[in-house]
Image: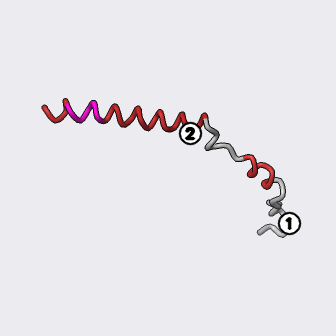
Amino acid sequence: MNGLLILVPIALLLGLAGLAAFFWALRSGQFDDPAGAASRILIDEDDDDGDGS
């Protein structure tokens, strides 16, 4: 029982630190992909060539 008094607050702090790191990365633009949308239009994904395979 004494172990839970130590481990639960540590787990909560680590969870909050991970959440804070995620929001920091989201706010600083780490998940933006400006080049991806521009190059995605150049990829030819037309696999329907009419032969049925």
N-terminal of the pair, mark 2 or mark 1, is 2
- Describe the element under mark 1 as helix, strand or loop: loop
Say if mark 2 contacts mark 1, CB within 8 Å.
no
Q: What stretch is highlighted in magenta?
A: 6-10
Rendering quarter of residue 3: top left
Residue that carries the numbered disc 1 in the rendered image: 49
Q: Where is residue 32 in the image (x, y as percent from the top left)?
A: 67, 43
* Mark 2, other Cα within 10 Å: few <14 / some 14–19 / many ≥20: few
42 in magenta = no
37 or 20, nearer to the observer? 20
What's under tag 2, amino acid-wise?
Ala
Gap between marks 2 and 1, in whole Å?
42 Å
**Residue sitting at x 44%, y 38%:** 18
**Residue sitting at x 59%, y 37%:** 26
Name the mark on residue 9: none
Residue that carries the numbered disc 2 in the rendered image: 25
- Describe the element under mark 2 as helix, strand or loop: helix
Quadrant the C terminus occupies? bottom right
